Structure formats: structure tokens, C-alpha cells
């Protein structure tokens, strides 16, 4: 347990890193989800990455400077790719559409979530709290909130059906109407409340992954 307590973050990051390479080079880059195991692999890799950053040592000198590291992939790859797609367009090229989708939803959004969780961890946050940040973030995007807002945010009328929400289609076997999608999104609210309520850090203390800390009188204090 001492070994796991000391190196859990490193083991998880390594698995998450190799898993990311597998997704990037071995899985199709497209918005459609043809196989269930694609989702399983992506969730598993994301889970290991979350664990890695949530248990990352936060007692290092100048550890706050590590929060600047995500700027590099953002500025060197993600934003340039998104900017290129936005300027030159992808509508006429299915391959470029798949590339755009992969960069936006498999790189950009997850990295935003993990950057926030990592910053929280480097600022002294507990592992369970960092995990909750990512859990809530991933739940929001899979709830269909983005799909519901896609047309209204771009000044378009409401879509009759969410035929572009492939992660929902693979669950129900068909595209949902906008009203059904709204109900589906609301059903995720109790799940988010559950994540907020879960005493993850107490569980980690009990199994010896983290050291016990004195409870703060006011968790909401600055």
C-alpha cells in the first residue's frame, strides 16, 4: 500500500499517456460512435488521467508553475488546429470533420477539465476534490447540454431531433427529440449531486492512499 500511495499518480499518468497514444493512433477520428468498446477505452484512459493528476504530489517547490504546462499543448497544437478549421472550414471534407471533432472533444475539453483539476491540486486541493471536478465536467458534456445549446448558441432554431448527438444515439438506438434530450439532460442533475456528496477523500484515507488531515471548519472559506 505504501508503494501504491507513493506512485499511484505516476502509474496512472503512464497508463493514461499510453492510452492516449492508442486512442490517437489506433481509433478512428470521427464523431460517430460505431463500437461500444471505443467509449469504454476512452473512459478508462480518461479515468487513469484523472487519478494521475488528482494524486500528483503537491508539496513540490514552485509547484504552481506546473499549472503553466497545459499552455504548451494548447498553444502548440490544439488552438492552431481549431483555428485552422475555423478559418478554412471542414464542412466539405468528412476526414477533416473527424479531425476537428477529435481535437475539440477528445483533446481540448478534457484538457480544460484536467487543467482546472490539476490547478486545484497544486493549490493544495485534496485528490477527491480534484476527481469531482473532472467527474462533474465529463457528466455535463455527456448529459447532452452542449447538444441542446448547439443551435441556440449559434442563433439557429431548435433542432427537431438531436441527430448529431452520437453518444446519446448509441444508448437509445435512435436520435432523441429536443424535449426528450432536455429530459435526458435533467436526469444527470441527481448524478452531479451524488458526485458532490461522495466522501471520496474519507474513503482514500481509510484505505491508506492519503494521510488524514484535520477537518477545516469552513470548507467554503477562501
Image (spheres, helix red, strand yellow):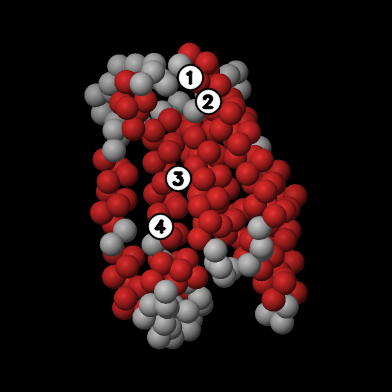
Relative vertical location of residue 46 with respect to residue 39 in this rendering, above or below: above
Task: Give the CA distance from mark 2 to mark 3.
Answer: 18 Å
Residue 140 is tagged as 4
Pick whichever of labels 1 and 4 is earlier in the sequence: 1
Image point (32%, 72%), residue name: 182
CA neighbours of label 4 inside 10 A, class few (<14), some (14 to 19), many (20+): some
Residue 134 is tagged as 3
Determine whether label 1 and label 2 are within 8 Å by CB.
yes
Image point (32%, 44%), residue name: 195
Pick whichever of labels 2 and 3 is earlier in the sequence: 2
CA neighbours of label 2 inside 10 A, class few (<14), some (14 to 19), many (20+): many
Image point (39%, 49%), residue name: 136
| Image location (x, y in percent) of residue 5 | 48, 19
Between disc 4 and disc 2, the foreground one is: 2
Task: Give the CA distance from mark 1 to mark 2.
Answer: 6 Å
Q: Which residue is mark 2?
A: 8
Q: How many marks?
A: 4
Please state if 33 lies on the left or on the right of 179 as rendered.
Answer: right
Amino acid at each position: 500500500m505504501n508503494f501504491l500511495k507513493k506512485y499511484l499518480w505516476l502509474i496512472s499518468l503512464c497508463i493514461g499517456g499510453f492510452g492516449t497514444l492508442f486512442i490517437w493512433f489506433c481509433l478512428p477520428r470521427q464523431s460517430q460512435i460505431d463500437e461500444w468498446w471505443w467509449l469504454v477505452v476512452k473512459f478508462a484512459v480518461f479515468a487513469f488521467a484523472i487519478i494521475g493528476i488528482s494524486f500528483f504530489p503537491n508539496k513540490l517547490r514552485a509547484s504552481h508553475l506546473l499549472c503553466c504546462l497545459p499552455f504548451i499543448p494548447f498553444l502548440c497544437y490544439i488552438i492552431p488546429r481549431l483555428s485552422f478549421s475555423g478559418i478554412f472550414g471542414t464542412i466539405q471534407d468528412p476526414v477533416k470533420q473527424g479531425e476537428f471533432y477529435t481535437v475539440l472533444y477528445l483533446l481540448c475539453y478534457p484538457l480544460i477539465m484536467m487543467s482546472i483539476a490539476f490547478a486545484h491540486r497544486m493549490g493544495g486541493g485534496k485528490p477527491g476534490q480534484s476527481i469531482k471536478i473532472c467527474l462533474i465536467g465529463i457528466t455535463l458534456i455527456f448529459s447532452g447540454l452542449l447538444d441542446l445549446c448547439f443551435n441556440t448558441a449559434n442563433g439557429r432554431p431548435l433542432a427537431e431531433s438531436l441527430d448529431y448527438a452520437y453518444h446519446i444515439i448509441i444508448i437509445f438506438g435512435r436520435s432523441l427529440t429536443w424535449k426528450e434530450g432536455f429530459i435526458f439532460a435533467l436526469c444527470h442533475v441527481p448524478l452531479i449531486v451524488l458526485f458532490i456528496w461522495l466522501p471520496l477523500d474519507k474513503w482514500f484515507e481509510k484505505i491508506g492512499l492519503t494521510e488524514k488531515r484535520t477537518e477545516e471548519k469552513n470548507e467554503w472559506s477562501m
